[in-house]
Amino acid sequence: MRKQIEVRQRLLAENERAAAELRDLFARNRMLVTNLISSPGSGKTTLLEATAAALGHDLRLGAVSGDIATERDADRLRRMGIPASQIITGGACHLDARLVTEHLANWDLAALDVLFIENVGNLVCPTSYDLGEDFKVALLSVTEGDDKPFKYPGIFARAAVTVITKIDLLPHVRFDMDAVRNQVRTLNPDTHILQLSCTTGEGVDSWCRLLLNLLDAKRDSMKEDRR
Amino acid sequence: MGMALTLYESCREEVAKHGPGRLEKVRVQIGELTGIEPELLKFAWQAVLEGGADAGCELSVDWRPAEQFCPACRSTKPRPDSSWIITCPDCESALQVQGGYELDLVEITFEPTAEGDKA
């Protein structure tokens, strides 16, 4: 006899459980964790290099980079003097919470203030996988075109911060900055939108300030929780 | 493809709770903002099932568009042709995006294949 059963279960329930454990782990270590998501080549690793150069003396930074293959990104970050390691997904187009948990088992998280999780270059799949981060950062370079937020609404609606990169190239490409800001605001009225160039350094200070503020805010809220 | 595999594992776990059985139909709901294309998911689903005991099991997808809600009017505004509206057509307030991240296994239908069914 045929049977029909109602299940009503989040498909990624397993990932969500693992992400909740990671979130507790990060809170116990009083660290800020961001999940950087963008298409390949929009400048995630370059932004982290610039961040390491600007904040590396004041904050203890660390990075894990997800990639389908190769150690290149982590190599670049280690050269900047921050602990970095590569999560090779072996084909998967996104990181999941279990992979990050296994990977961080060898890390001394208490020695970090901020951990950057650089996701696999992809604007779609990483959006659905919570990694226990405090917030997601969506990056969009001006060379990718000004229609991306509405084309990939999932990530822009979820990211607390949108960073528009490579603005030094604006004179050479057709990119309507106001249109992009409007699209992002439509999807996510509360998001922070930053514009920067890691080549000229313009705007990198605002990004660094935002990180410092968010780290302070997290630590302050934890103090209040304890009272 | 990964999602189809996760889905299949969840379905098998559910069936296993009720004893051995062959999957016949699976219903999921997928939100617009997950970026998952229903047709691609169905294609990947058949690829996952191919050659196994559950081959041919039908996957049906309930599509859940995101909604745009106006906090001033306290109502959801229609999105013509699934486009995004920049401000409320009635009062020009900024709109909130709601829903669209659904990614749920809703229901499965299976045929028990042995005696001693526990359910």
Image (cartoon, rainbow, N blue to C red):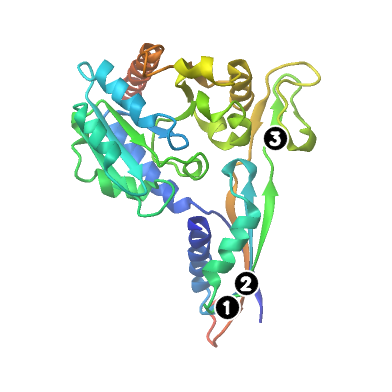
Return the x and y of residue A14 as percentages of the image width and height. 43, 53
Q: CB under 8 Å between callouts 1 and 2?
A: yes
Residue that mark 1 sits on: B22
Query: In this rendering, is residue A115 above or below B28?
Result: above
The residue marked by circle 3 belongs to what chain?
Answer: B
Q: Using the numbered discs, state the Cα–Cα distance from disc 1 to disc 2 in whole angstroms.
A: 9 Å
Say what amino acid the circle numbered 2 marks. Answer: Cys
Lower sequence index among marks 3 and 2: 2
B74 to A10, vertically: above or below: above
Q: CA distance from mark 3 to mark 2?
A: 31 Å
> Residue shown at 45%/15% (left/top)?
A168
Q: Is residue A69 above or below residue A179?
A: below
Q: Nearer the viewer, residue A120 or A110?
A: A120
Asked whether the viewer can see residue A227, the reply is: no
Q: Nearer the viewer, mark 1 or mark 2?
A: 2
Residue at 33% x, 49% y is: A69
- Give the structural element (helix, strand or loop) at label 3: strand
Mark 1 belongs to which amino acid?
Arg
Q: Is residue A166 left or right of residue A70?
A: right
Instruction: Kindly identify the residue that appears in the image at 44 percent across and 46 percent down.
Output: A16
Q: What x and y, as percent, mark residue A11?
A: 52, 54
Where is residue A88 shown, x and y percent of the image?
31, 49
- Tell me the subunit letter for badge 1: B
Find out whether the residues at labels 3 and 2 contact each other: C-beta distance under 8 Å: no
Q: Amino acid at mark 3?
A: Glu
Q: Which residue is mark 3?
A: B67
- Which badge, 1 or 2, is on the more N-terminal residue? 1
Left or right: B88 as drawn, with respect to B44? right
Say the numbered circle drawn on residue B57.
2
In the image, what residue occupies the spot 66% across and 78% down? Answer: A2
Q: Earlier in the sequence, mark 1 or mark 3?
A: 1
Crowd around label 2: few <14 · some 14–19 · many ≥20 (10 Å): some
